[in-house]
Amino acid sequence: MNRRRILTVCYGNICRSPLAAAVLTQLGGDTVEVRSAGIRDKWTGKPAHLTMAEAAAPHGYDLSRHRARQVDRDLMHWADTILAMGASNLAALHELADEDTARRLALYLGDRDVPDPFGQPGSAFNDCIEMIVAGAARHLQCSGG
């Protein structure tokens, strides 16, 4: 079986994109392989944001093994679909993309950003989780999930 390869991308790869990768992996099962990355390298090698990891756990999403990485062209070529968490992430990906990878780019929610909870109160992390979970089905439909 050919699994769809999905890459989720946010600013630092410590909040939104690792959560989206965990959600898509869990909901997509064997139909998908999901990785995540960030536009900036500031947090490369760091774990998921503690508040995000703590907020995700009761929903069944384990971010404890996540380590941030920066997006690069090789990772973009690996993916069948590249999902940006926000318009600024999408713009940065377009700058990095070539003709082949540019057509794989999309916003995770289609027409709006998943707001970055970094630096916000815990409720923003919970809101982020709800948005990401609610938006997941649109990316799994053609994989049978």
Image (spheres, grey):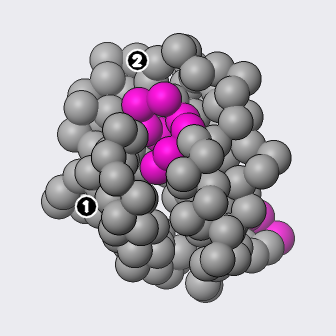
Q: Say whether disc 2 or disc 1 marks the residue closer to the N-terminus.
A: 2
The magenta stretch spans which residues?
Answer: 1-16
Residue extending farthest bottom: 144
Which residue is drawn at the image coordinates 54% and 51% (left, top)? 51
- Callout 1, which amino acid? Gly
Which residue is drawn at the image coordinates 46% and 49% (left, top)? 16
Circle 2/circle 1 CB separation < 8 Å: no
Vertical arrangement, residue 85 with respect to residue 71, above or below? below
Disc 2: which residue = 96
- Callout 2, which amino acid? Leu
Question: Residue 62: x, y in percent?
Answer: 74, 62
Is residue 65 found left or right of 90 in the rendered image?
right
Badge 2 marks a residue whose secondary structure is helix
On the rendered image, what quadrant is the C terminus found in? bottom right
Depth check: 33 or 16 in front? Answer: 16
Question: Residue 92: x, y in percent?
Answer: 32, 23
Q: Residues within 10 Å of mark 1 (few under 14, many from 20)?
A: few
Q: Is residue 2 magenta?
A: yes
Question: Residue 122: x, y in percent?
Answer: 41, 58
Quote the CA–CA distance across marks 2 and 1.
Answer: 20 Å
Q: Which mark is residue 110?
A: 1
Q: Residues within 10 Å of mark 2 (few under 14, many from 20)?
A: some
